[in-house]
Image: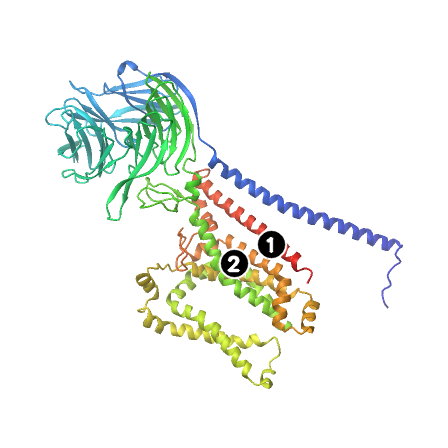
C-alpha cells in the first residue's frame, strides 16, 4: 500500500518543517563558522610568520650604561682597550706596558699587571686577531714582548666570578727583532701553533720581517723560540700602518701617500711585493686601517669620513688584485679608529668629532650613527659577542654601551640583490647558510631558492599540463561512459599516493634510468606522438566495416599497444644511438662538448615526478569542468552543423575555461608548495640555472632541510621563516589573481 503524506497543517508536517528549518540553520552556521575558521587560521599564520620575521628589520640601538674617568689614568696613555665575552671585565693596555683590568660598568680597577721591560720603553704596539687576545709591544731597543690577557670563570656560591690575568705564550723575556737595537716604530704580529710572525719598521726606516719558530721541550711545557729576521728592501720609507693577516701569508704596508703595498710573506725568508695600490682619493689620507673578521678584507678609513672595503680579487690574468668593493660614510670628519666584530662581518668606526657608526660590510648597511662625545673618540673596544662597546675619548672619558644589533647581516640588497662576497670574483646571488669553518660568512640570498621554486614548478607543469588537460578533455567529451567510470577514479586515486614515495622512486629509480637511457628518453618525445599520428592516419584508411567493430569512445584502448611499442623501441635504440652520436656517454658529451653540466638528480627528474603528483589534481578539476558543460550547448552546436571538434574548441572549452584555469592554478600552487619530491629527487643545490640537466633548491625544501638545525631566534632561523612568508605571500597573491581571472572568464562565457 502506497505511503500517504500527512496534511500540510498536521502536527507531523509542522514538526518535520520545524526540524528541517533547524537543520538548515545548523548547516548554515556550521558552514559559516567553518569558512570563517579557515580565514582566521590563514590570517593567524600570516601574522605569526610576520611576528617571527619582523625582528630581522628592527634597526640597531645603543644605550649607555656606564660613564667614568679612565681607569688608573696615572699608569700611562692608552694603546688599546678590550673586554671579555660576559662584558663584565675590561682591560686597558698602556704605553707603560701595563694591562689594567677594570669593571666595565663602574670603571673600578680590579688588577694591574706590569710587564718587565728592564731598561727599555714601549715604542710601538700591535694586536693579533682579536679572538686570540694576544698583544705585542715593540720596544725602543729593537726587542718585542708578547702577552695575552686571559679570563677564568668560576662559580663560587653559584655566582659567576671572572678572574683576569696575563700570560706570556712566547715567554716572559723580550725577543730581539732588530740586532742593531733601533727602536721599533711600527708593528704587526700574528701567532699560530708552529710559528709567530712579526713585521716591524725601525727608526732608521727599515722594514723587518721576523719568524719566531716554536720548539716544545720533551721534558716540560717550555717553548723555545728561534728567531730569523729578513729585511724587506722594497718597502716605502714613510710607513704609517702595518697589517699582517692571521694566516701569515700577506703583509699590508700603508704609507702617507695613500698607497697600500701588498707583500706575499708565505715564505718569510723571501717576501715578494705583489702590488701597490692607491686606496684613497687624491684629496684624502689614510687615517685608520683594520682587518675585517677573517683577515681577508681591509677596512680603510680616510680623512673625509669615508670607510672603504677592499679585498683581493682574481683578474683575467689569474692574478689577485686588491679591489675596492664598497664604501661607507660616517659624518665627514676624519676616521680615528675602526674595530671589527669578532665573528660577524660588521665593524664600528669613530671619528674626530665624537661620532661612532655601526656598519655591516656584506649587507652594505649602516646600522646607526650617533654622536656620543664632544671630543674625538680615540679608542673602541667591542665585546666578543658584539653586544657591548667601550669607548675612550681624547679627554680620557670612558663610556660603556649596550648594543642591540641582532641581525645586521640582513638587508634588502643581501636578500634580493647580487652581493660581492669575499674570495668571489664578482657579485652573485648565493645561498649558503652553513659550512665547516668558523670563519665562514652565511650567505642568505633568497633569490636562488625562489628561482628554484619557480623552476621546479615550471618543469612540473610543463610535463603535467598537456597530459592532464588533454586526457581530461578526451575522458569527459569523447570517451564512452563505461570506460570513463574506470579511467577517472583510477587517475584520481593517484592523488592519494604519498609524495615521499614518489620522491623516493624518482631519486633512487627514475634518475639512474634517465641517465642511462637519455637518448632514448629524448627519442621517445619524438617517436611517441609521431607513431600515434601515423597510427591514426593508418586507422582512417581502414575500411569502415572494420572500424565499426570498435564502439565510439573505446578507440583510446587501441593506442595502448602503440604507446608501449613506441616506448620499448625508443629505449632499445638508446644504446646504439648513444654509441653512434655521443661517444657512448651522452651526459659526458653534454659536459665536454657543449659545456652543459649534468647532475643525475636534475630538473627533468623533478618535473616528471612532481608532474605525476600534479596530474590527478589538474585532471580531476578539468574533467569535471568539461563534463559539466550543459548538453544543450553541445547539442545545439552539433544541430547547427558544427563538427565535434568545432563544438569542443568554440563551445565546450570556452564554457569550461574558468574550471580549466582553476585546475591549472591549483596544480601550480601544489607544485610550488611541494616539499618531499624536490627534497629527494634533486641535489638541493641553490643554483641559478635554467638548464633541465641541473638541480635546484626550493623554498619549501630549504625550510624542511634546515629548520631542524637552526638555532631558535637566530638570523638563520628567522630567514627560514622569511622564506616561508615569501612562499605564503606568493601563493596567496597568485591564487588571488587567478581567482580574479577565473571570475572574469566565468562572467564572459556564462551567457553561452
Mark 1: give few (<14), some (14-19) or many (20+) Cα within 10 Å. Answer: some
Task: Determine the residue located farthest toward the left in the rendered image.
Answer: 180
Residue 359, horizontal then vertical, whole percent: 38, 32
Give residue 663's quadrant in the image. Answer: bottom right
Residue 278, horizontal then vertical, whole percent: 25, 35
The answer to whether residue 87 of the structure is visible from this angle is no
SS at mark 2 in the image: loop
Q: Nearer the viewer, residue 21 or 185?
A: 185
Q: Specify the color scheme.
A: rainbow
Q: Which residue is mark 1?
A: 741
Give residue 147's quadrant in the image. Answer: top left
For residue 647, above or below residue 716? below
Please report whichever mark, 2 or 1, sits nearer to the chain's N-terminal start.
2
Task: Determine the residue located farthest toward the top in the rendered image.
Answer: 74
Task: State left or right for residue 494 relative to residue 271.
Answer: right
Residue 420, horizontal then vertical, whole percent: 35, 43
Give residue 157's quadrant in the image. Answer: top left
Q: Which residue is mark 2?
A: 498
Task: State left or right for residue 182 relative to residue 597.
Answer: left
SS at mark 1 in the image: helix
Q: Quadrant of the N terminus?
A: bottom right
- Is disc 2 in contact with disc 1, using a CB cutoff of under 8 Å? no
Q: Quadrant of the C terminus?
A: bottom right
Task: State left or right for residue 361 relative to residue 552.
Answer: left
Residue 80, horizontal then vertical, whole percent: 29, 24
Q: Nearer the viewer, residue 518 or 384?
A: 518
The answer to whether residue 78 of the structure is visible from this angle is yes
Q: Residue at x 48, y 43 (%)?
A: 722
Q: Which mark is residue 395?
A: none
* Separation (CA) of disc 2 from disc 1: 31 Å
For residue 515, above or below residue 406? below
Q: Residue at x 54, y 54 (%)?
A: 669
Amino acid at each position: 500500500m502506497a505511503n500517504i503524506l500527512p496534511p500540510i497543517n498536521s502536527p507531523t508536517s509542522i514538526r518535520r518543517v520545524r526540524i528541517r528549518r533547524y537543520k538548515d540553520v545548523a548547516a548554515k552556521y556550521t558552514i559559516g563558522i567553518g569558512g570563517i575558521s579557515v580565514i582566521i587560521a590563514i590570517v593567524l599564520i600570516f601574522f605569526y610568520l610576520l611576528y617571527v620575521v619582523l625582528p630581522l628589520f628592527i634597526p640597531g640601538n645603543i644605550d649607555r650604561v656606564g660613564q667614568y674617568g679612565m681607569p688608573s689614568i696615572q699608569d700611562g696613555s692608552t694603546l688599546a682597550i678590550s673586554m671579555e665575552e660576559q662584558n663584565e671585565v675590561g682591560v686597558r693596555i698602556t704605553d707603560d706596558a701595563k694591562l689594567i683590568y677594570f669593571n666595565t660598568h663602574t670603571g673600578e680597577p680590579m688588577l694591574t699587571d706590569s710587564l718587565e721591560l728592564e731598561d727599555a720603553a714601549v715604542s710601538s704596539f700591535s694586536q693579533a686577531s682579536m679572538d686570540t687576545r694576544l698583544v705585542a709591544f715593540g720596544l725602543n731597543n729593537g726587542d718585542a714582548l708578547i702577552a695575552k690577557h686571559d679570563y677564568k670563570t668560576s662559580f663560587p656560591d653559584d655566582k659567576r666570578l671572572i678572574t683576569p690575568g696575563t700570560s706570556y705564550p712566547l715567554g716572559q723575556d723580550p725577543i730581539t727583532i732588530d740586532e742593531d737595537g733601533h727602536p721599533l716604530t711600527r708593528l704587526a704580529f700574528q701567532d699560530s701553533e708552529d710559528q709567530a710572525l712579526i713585521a716591524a719598521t725601525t727608526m732608521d726606516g727599515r722594514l723587518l720581517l721576523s719568524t719566531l719558530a716554536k720548539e716544545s721541550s720533551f721534558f716540560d711545557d717550555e717553548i723555545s723560540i728561534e728567531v730569523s729576521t729578513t729585511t724587506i728592501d722594497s718597502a716605502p720609507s714613510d710607513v704609517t700602518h702595518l697589517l699582517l693577516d692571521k694566516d701569515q701569508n700577506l703583509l699590508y704596508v700603508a704609507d702617507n701617500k695613500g698607497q697600500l703595498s701588498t707583500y706575499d710573506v708565505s715564505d718569510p725568508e723571501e717576501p715578494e711585493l705583489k702590488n701597490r695600490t692607491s686606496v684613497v682619493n687624491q684629496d684624502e689620507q689614510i687615517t685608520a686601517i683594520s682587518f675585517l673578521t677573517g683577515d681577508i678584507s681591509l677596512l680603510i678609513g680616510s680623512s673625509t669620513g669615508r670607510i672603504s672595503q677592499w679585498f683581493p680579487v682574481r683578474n683575467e690574468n689569474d692574478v689577485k688584485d686588491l679591489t675596492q668593493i664598497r664604501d661607507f660614510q660616517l659624518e665627514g670628519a676624519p676616521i680615528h679608529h675602526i674595530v671589527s666584530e669578532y665573528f660577524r662581518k660588521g665593524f664600528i668606526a669613530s671619528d674626530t668629532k665624537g661620532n661612532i657608526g655601526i656598519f655591516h660590510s656584506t649587507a652594505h648597511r649602516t646600522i646607526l650613527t650617533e654622536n656620543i662625545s664632544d671630543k674625538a673618540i680615540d679608542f673602541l673596544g667591542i665585546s666578543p659577542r658584539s653586544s657591548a662597546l667601550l669607548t675612550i675619548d681624547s679627554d680620557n672619558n670612558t663610556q660603556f654601551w649596550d648594543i642591540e644589533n641582532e641581525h645586521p647581516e640582513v638587508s634588502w640588497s643581501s636578500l634580493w640583490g647580487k652581493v660581492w662576497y669575499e674570495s668571489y670574483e664578482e657579485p652573485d646571488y648565493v645561498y649558503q647558510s652553513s659550512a665547516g669553518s668558523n670563519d665562514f660568512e652565511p650567505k642568505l640570498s633568497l633569490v636562488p631558492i625562489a628561482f628554484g621554486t619557480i623552476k621546479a614548478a615550471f618543469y612540473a607543469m610543463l610535463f603535467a599540463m598537456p597530459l592532464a588537460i588533454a586526457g581530461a578533455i578526451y575522458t569527459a567529451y569523447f570517451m564512452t561512459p563505461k570506460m570513463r567510470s574506470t579511467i577517472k577514479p583510477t587517475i584520481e586515486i593517484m592523488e592519494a599516493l604519498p609524495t615521499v614515495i614518489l620522491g623516493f622512486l624518482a631519486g633512487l629509480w627514475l634518475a639512474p634510468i634517465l641517465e642511462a637511457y637519455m637518448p632514448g628518453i629524448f627519442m621517445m618525445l619524438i617517436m611517441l606522438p609521431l607513431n600515434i599520428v601515423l597510427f591514426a592516419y593508418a586507422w582512417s584508411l581502414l575500411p569502415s566495416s572494420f572500424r565499426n567493430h570498435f564502439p565510439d569512445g573505446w578507440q583510446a584502448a587501441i593506442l595502448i599497444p602503440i604507446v608501449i611499442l613506441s616506448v620499448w623501441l625508443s629505449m632499445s635504440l638508446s644504446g646504439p644511438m648513444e654509441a653512434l652520436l655521443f661517444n657512448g656517454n651522452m651526459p659526458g658529451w653534454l659536459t665536454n662538448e657543449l659545456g652543459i653540466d649534468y647532475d643525475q638528480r636534475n630538473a627533468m627528474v623533478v618535473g616528471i615526478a612532481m608532474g605525476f603528483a600534479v596530474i590527478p589534481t589538474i585532471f580531476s578539476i578539468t574533467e569535471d569542468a568539461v563534463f559539466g558543460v550543459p548538453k544543450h550547448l553541445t547539442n545545439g552546436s552539433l544541430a547547427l552543423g558544427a563538427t565535434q571538434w568545432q563544438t569542443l574548441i568554440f563551445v565546450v572549452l570556452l564554457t569550461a575555461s574558468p574550471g580549466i584555469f582553476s585546475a591549472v592554478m591549483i596544480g601550480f600552487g601544489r607544485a610550488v608548495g611541494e616539499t618531499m619530491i624536490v627534497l629527494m629527487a634533486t641535489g638541493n643545490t641553490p643554483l641559478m640555472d635554467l638548464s633541465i640537466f641541473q638541480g635546484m633548491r626550493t623554498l619549501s625544501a630549504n625550510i624542511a632541510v634546515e629548520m631542524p638545525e637552526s638555532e631558535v631566534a637566530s638570523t638563520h632561523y628567522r630567514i627560514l621563516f622569511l622564506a616561508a612568508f615569501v612562499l605564503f605571500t606568493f601563493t596567496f597573491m597568485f591564487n588571488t589573481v587567478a581567482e580574479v581571472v577565473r571570475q572574469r572568464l566565468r562572467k564572459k562565457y556564462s551567457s553561452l
